[in-house]
């Protein structure tokens, strides 16, 4: 059973992972992942780890709103990011710090473990307004530009992960969401882009294994929302359901797990994995059952 939400701060008895590497794929819809054909690396990780295609986004199913919940551990009405490109809360956020936003997973790591190294790579500037960049040891905003392929972006990020060996690394991709808006969720272009991102995930996993960093690594792959037609932001299951996949040596080989999951459960689960104290105001609950004993 899942551990019930505590009335006070909560932490794991000990860290379950030496490091967390979190791959965020904007606009990855569960229904598209389910139907995709050419994604061998994702399929392999799903076979080796634990996953659900029924994780619900918070409402509305927009990017800034949901990435805020992913990292801040609370729903929309608490962090108050209320639209897709929001850079600040629309009203005073609950438990806001000096920057006006609630503490993020990066904030927790910096405060509770000041010597820890964290890393964030992202190619959409909106992520920088959400993750609390002041608490991130190394942040790389690398927007799309001629000559920078998705593979190059991945290689550079992987090289820095191998070099710095951060306890928390976030690698964000905006490409799939852009193709969804241009060509449609479930289109041939969408699946071709997903296949390219699958190759990048394979590239990242190989880099971790080649550097002897796979042991102790919790690899997380998830998304902010799905899509329908050429849009998202609405209240259909196609827009609200996004996958959550974990793999690596700290993870039990569960395959699909049936427990209900909401976007803000991600922050609590990753904090639990790192042995961090989960704030009392967070509404997410750690999925403790996915970890090996």
Image (cartoon, grey):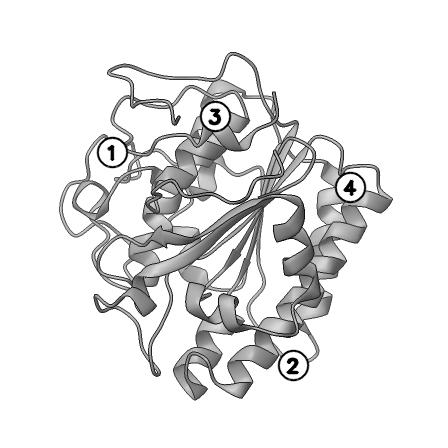
The label nearer to you, 3 versus 2, is: 3
Which numbered tag is attached to residue 96?
1
* SS of the residue under disc 4: helix
Q: CA distance from mark 2 to mark 4?
A: 26 Å
Q: Position of residue 108 (x, y in %)?
A: 44, 27
Instruction: Tell me the residue at 24%/52% (across/down).
Output: 81
The label nearer to you, 3 versus 4, is: 3
Q: CA distance from mark 3 to mark 4?
A: 25 Å
Q: Compare marks 3 and 2 and give the one earlier in the sequence.
A: 2
- Residue 87, by quadrant, is bottom left
Residue 206, compared with residue 107, is above or below; it is: below
Q: Compare marks 4 and 1 and give the one earlier in the sequence.
A: 1
Q: Position of residue 47 (x, y in %)?
A: 65, 50
Q: CA distance from mark 3 to mark 1?
A: 21 Å
Front-most of 77 and 28? 28
- In the rendered view, does 58 fall on the left or right side of 197? left
Residue with the mark numbered 2: 146
Residue with the mark numbered 3: 272
Query: Alpha-carbon neighbours of circle 4 within 10 Å: few (<14), some, or many (≥20)?
Result: few
Q: Position of residue 5 (x, y in %)?
A: 29, 23
């Amino acid at each position: 059973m899942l551990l019930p939400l505590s009335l006070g701060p909560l932490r794991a008895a000990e860290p379950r992972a030496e490091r967390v590497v979190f791959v965020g794929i904007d606009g990855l819809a569960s229904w598209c992942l389910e139907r995709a054909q050419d994604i061998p690396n994702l399929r392999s990780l799903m076979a080796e780890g634990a996953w659900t295609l029924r994780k619900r986004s918070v409402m509305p199913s927009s990017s800034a709103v949901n990435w805020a919940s992913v990292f801040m551990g609370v729903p929309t009405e608490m962090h108050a990011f209320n639209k897709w490109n929001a850079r600040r809360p629309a009203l005073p956020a609950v438990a806001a710090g000096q920057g006006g936003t609630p503490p993020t997973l990066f904030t927790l790591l910096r405060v509770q473990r000041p010597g820890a190294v964290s890393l964030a790579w992202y190619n959409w500037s909106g992520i920088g307004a959400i993750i609390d960049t002041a608490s991130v040891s190394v942040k790389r905003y690398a927007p799309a530009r001629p000559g920078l392929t998705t593979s190059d972006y991945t290689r550079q990020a992987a090289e820095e992960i191998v070099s710095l060996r951060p306890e928390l690394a976030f690698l964000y991709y905006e490409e799939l969401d852009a193709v969804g808006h241009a060509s449609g969720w479930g289109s041939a272009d969408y699946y071709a882009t997903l296949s390219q991102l699958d190759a990048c995930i394979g590239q990242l996993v190989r880099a971790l294994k080649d550097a002897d960093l796979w042991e102790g690594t919790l690899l997380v792959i998830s998304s902010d929302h799905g899509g329908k037609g050429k849009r998202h932001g609405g209240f259909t299951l196609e827009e609200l359901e996004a996958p959550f996949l974990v793999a690596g040596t700290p993870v039990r080989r569960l395959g699909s797990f049936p427990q209900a999951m909401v976007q803000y459960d991600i922050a609590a689960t990753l904090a639990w994995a790192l042995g961090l104290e989960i704030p009392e105001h967070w509404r997410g609950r750690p999925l403790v059952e996915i970890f090996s004993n």
